[in-house]
Image (cartoon, rainbow, N blue to C red):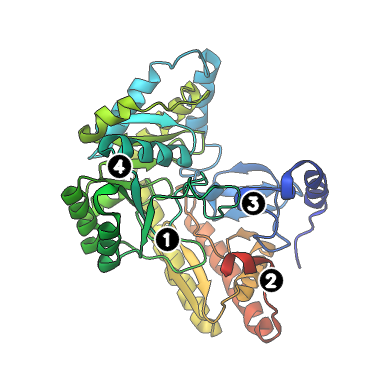
Amino acid sequence: MPLSNSQDRQLRERAAAVIPGGMYGHQSTGLLPDDYPQFFAKAKGARLWDVDGHELLDFMCAYGPNLMGYADESIDAAYVSRMRQGDTMTGPSALIVELAETMTAMVTHADWAIFCKNGGDATQIALMTARAHTGRKTVILAKGAYHGALPWCTPRPTGATPEERANRFFCDYNDIASLEAAVAAAGDDLAAIFAAPVKHDAFVDQALPDPAYARRTRELCDQTGALLVVDDVRAGLRIARDCSWATLGVQPDLSSWGKCFANGHPISALLGSEKARKAASQIYTTGSFWYQAAPMAAALETLKRVRETDYLEHMEGLGERLRSGLAERAAAAGIGLRQTGPVTMPLFLFDDDPDLRQGFLWSSQMLARGVYVHPWHNMFLCAAMTSADIDQALDAAEASFAVVKAERPALGPVAKLSFLLA
């Protein structure tokens, strides 16, 4: 039985009158099954409650920001305490220096930090810094990689001009020959190569980086004088306590961070090496809330937890247990389920499901059993999850696989996603 959602439906009707399209971004109408809630009332630990009062085990973690658990008491206490002293002020508090010192001490390649609000802010500053450093315009991106929603990189370019999206070449992730061809095409104008820490594109299987591909990316940047940018906004602190490519022995010149290093409080960062310091000091970038002190206090508390606890190993253990349990239950049901990406950032896709009809049905069935998963976007584990949570998810998955097997022959296409899957 689908969850009752009268309050959510009423809010959708009101939103349609005052918000373009009813909602924007990753919660836009039509991107999820119709029975999925769009509005939520509260969150605690690993769980959400929608406006109709349904409790949900949340494997989206706010699309990544929830690292230690929603409404974590010590992190939120640090935020509130600093807010009461002064938050958005004419200039920054001393915490901006402490946070920059903390992050540069944690991240091997980093010698300096600039703080902002969203991941897109950080990747934009990275682009500006690389162009200022090299005096060049062109960047190389992997096809399908997401680096934010600003005009130069938004995946849906309506409203962006050709000029804003110029000076870009593309390669295939993990394909060295394709990367080398893009570098050759850029010629003497290459300013930067933007690298995703893993292939975490929507709608397709994820892939871990090939160490040879990562090393060759670094070599090509060194040979051409371009800067290597690792966009760790999504994966930062879920793969390593350092920049994600540090696990491969590859150090970037710049790395962008966001989402979870303040456990959901609004802050992001660009970290850079000494090589790029002068260029970063010459560009002009700012925002009214970029000096905000309370998120910096939350970040310092979160990063203390990162350094002093086994949060990452805990999430990895739960992720392995979830992955093996889902594989067993899918096989027992005769369902072809593909699980890709890091175990802390899983993606689930079904075999023979080009328009996601099975994925949408399974996700809806999981929701009806109190588990929020996503039919086409990578998910996230958080440190507040427990073995009991994984058991709940596996029990829900087993029952949901049975429904998919029974209803699969009669499923129709998910027509609403045709514009994205084309």
Residue highlighted by disc 1: 319
Amino acid beneath label 2: Ala
Labels 1 and 4 touching (C-beta < 8 A): no
| Residue 35 in which image quadrant | bottom right
Within 10 Å of disc 2 (Cα), the crowding (few <14, some 14-19, many 20+) is: few
Within 10 Å of disc 3 (Cα), the crowding (few <14, some 14-19, many 20+) is: few
Q: Which of 327 and 105 is in front in this view?
A: 105
- C-alpha separation, residue under disc 3 versus residue under disc 4: 36 Å
Residue 79 horizontal/vertical position (percent): 51, 26
Amino acid beneath label 1: Gly
Residue highlighted by disc 3: 27
Residue 231 visible (yes or no): yes
- Tag shown at residue 136: 4
Among numbered discs 1 and 4, the one appearing first in the sequence: 4
Labels 2 and 1 touching (C-beta < 8 A): no
Q: Which of 320 and 172 is in front in this view?
A: 172
Among numbered discs 2 and 4, the one appearing first in the sequence: 4
- Tag shown at residue 415: 2
| Rendered view: 22 above or below 308 | below
- C-alpha separation, residue under disc 2 versus residue under disc 4: 43 Å
Labels 3 and 4 touching (C-beta < 8 A): no
Within 10 Å of disc 4 (Cα), the crowding (few <14, some 14-19, many 20+) is: some
